[in-house]
């Protein structure tokens, strides 16, 4: 299947992401109104105190919801995208099939969370090479700006590595999720030129849409809040949340599908270069942790690797 077909056929997960994010925004607006009302009754810095209490509550609830619902929703979407790309078809009841695949592969939310965080952390650390270039050439006029733009582009393009690697874990049920994820990272970096090339145009589009997705809600909410005499600071935070929900639901989902389609085209035929495990372990402590967990569970798979 092509990217567009996979994206459209798995739209159920996009709408669920939007519903979850919209519920969080609604919760934020309701609690904001309550905290503002309470804060306005006090003297002095009552509103300011109410704002910080509201922000603390919203951030805490958002982290909890994302931890226990958002991650599982993303995992289910990844499972169905992997199925669509590798088999060319999807089950009639995608939600039940996704739930079954995620439960079979990761058993618990905690296992998925640990694997996802280790993969994301490893990729972030492996991008540090651009920062070293910036440090060396930072004194040259204009170079810092160019390198900063390059880092931003790479960060966007590689921001979906974890989804690709987690998708790879669904292809290899015979081995542990940690080993499959480590293999997935190695496969990604063996094919980085092709995958970055495929992501180039889409990454630029993401930048443009992200700016619009943030700017429009901010302007709208600022106008609404100003009409009721509410500080623009509240509009800023609500605008950021609204933009994050739109991007996460539609833009990130499409970018994820595009990168996974490209990844799954090369993953099955890639012959893993085992010395890359050693190189990536030296570059990233997170990858080393991921690698070690996989080695502990299936050491025979890594006989050629020197630690």
Image (spheres, grey):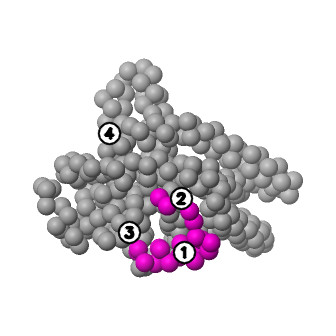
If you read the primary sequence from the N terminus, does the residue marked by circle 3 or circle 2 appear first? Answer: 2
Q: Is residue 44 above or below residue 122?
A: below
View extreme (top): residue: 141
Res. 21 in view: no
Instruction: Residue under label 1, please give it.
Output: 97
The local crowd at label 4, few if under 14, some if 14 to 19, many if 20 or more residues have their Cα within 10 Å, is few
Q: Is residue 56 magenta?
A: no
Marks 1 and 2, Cα distance to the nearest angstrom? 15 Å
Instruction: Residue under label 4, please give it.
Output: 129
Instruction: Residue under label 3, please give it.
Output: 114
Question: Between residues 39 and 71, which one lies in front from this camera angle?
Answer: 71
Marks 3 and 2, Cα distance to the nearest angstrom? 30 Å
Tell me which residue sits at (78%, 53%) in the image.
221
Residue 172: quadrant of the picture: bottom left
**Contact, CB < 8 Å: mark 3 with mark 2?**
no
Instruction: Residue under label 2, please give it.
Output: 88
The local crowd at label 3, few if under 14, some if 14 to 19, many if 20 or more residues have their Cα within 10 Å, is few
Mark 3 or 1, which is nearer the eye? 1
The boundaries of the magenta stretch are 86-106
Mark 1 or 4, which is nearer the eye? 1
Q: Is residue 90 magenta?
A: yes
Marks 1 and 4, Cα distance to the nearest angstrom? 40 Å
Question: Between residues 54 and 291, which one lies in front from this camera angle?
Answer: 291
Helix, strand or loop: magenta stretch: helix
The local crowd at label 1, few if under 14, some if 14 to 19, many if 20 or more residues have their Cα within 10 Å, is some
Q: Position of residue 14 (x, y in %)?
A: 64, 61
């Amino acid at each position: 299947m092509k990217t567009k077909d996979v994206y459209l056929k798995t739209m159920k997960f996009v709408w669920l992401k939007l519903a979850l994010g919209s519920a969080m925004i609604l919760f934020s607006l309701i609690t904001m109104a309550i905290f503002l009302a309470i804060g306005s009754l006090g003297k002095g810095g009552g509103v300011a105190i109410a704002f910080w209490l509201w922000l603390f509550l919203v951030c805490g609830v958002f982290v909890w919801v994302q931890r226990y619902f958002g991650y599982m929703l993303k995992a289910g979407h990844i499972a169905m995208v992997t199925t669509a790309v590798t088999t060319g078809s999807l089950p009639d009841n995608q939600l039940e099939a996704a739930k079954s695949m995620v439960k079979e592969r990761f058993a618990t939310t905690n296992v998925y969370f640990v694997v996802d965080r280790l993969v994301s952390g490893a990729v972030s650390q492996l991008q540090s090479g651009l920062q070293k270039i910036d440090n060396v050439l930072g004194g040259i006029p204009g170079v810092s700006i160019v390198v900063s733009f390059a880092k931003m582009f790479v960060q966007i393009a590689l921001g979906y590595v974890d989804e690709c690697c987690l998708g790879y874990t669904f292809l290899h049920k015979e081995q542990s999720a940690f080993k499959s994820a480590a293999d997935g990272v190695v496969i990604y970096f063996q094919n980085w030129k092709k995958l970055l090339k495929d992501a180039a145009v889409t990454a630029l589009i993401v930048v443009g849409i992200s700016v619009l997705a943030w700017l429009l809600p901010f302007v709208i909410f600022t106008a609404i809040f100003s009409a009721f005499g509410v500080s623009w600071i509240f509009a800023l935070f609500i605008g950021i949340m609204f933009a994050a929900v739109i991007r996460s639901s539609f833009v990130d989902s499409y970018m994820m599908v595009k990168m996974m389609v490209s990844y799954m085209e090369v993953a099955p035929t890639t012959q893993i270069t085992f010395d890359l495990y050693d190189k990536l372990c030296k570059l990233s402590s997170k990858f080393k942790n991921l690698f070690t967990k996989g080695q502990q569970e299936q050491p025979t798979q890594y006989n050629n690797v020197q630690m």
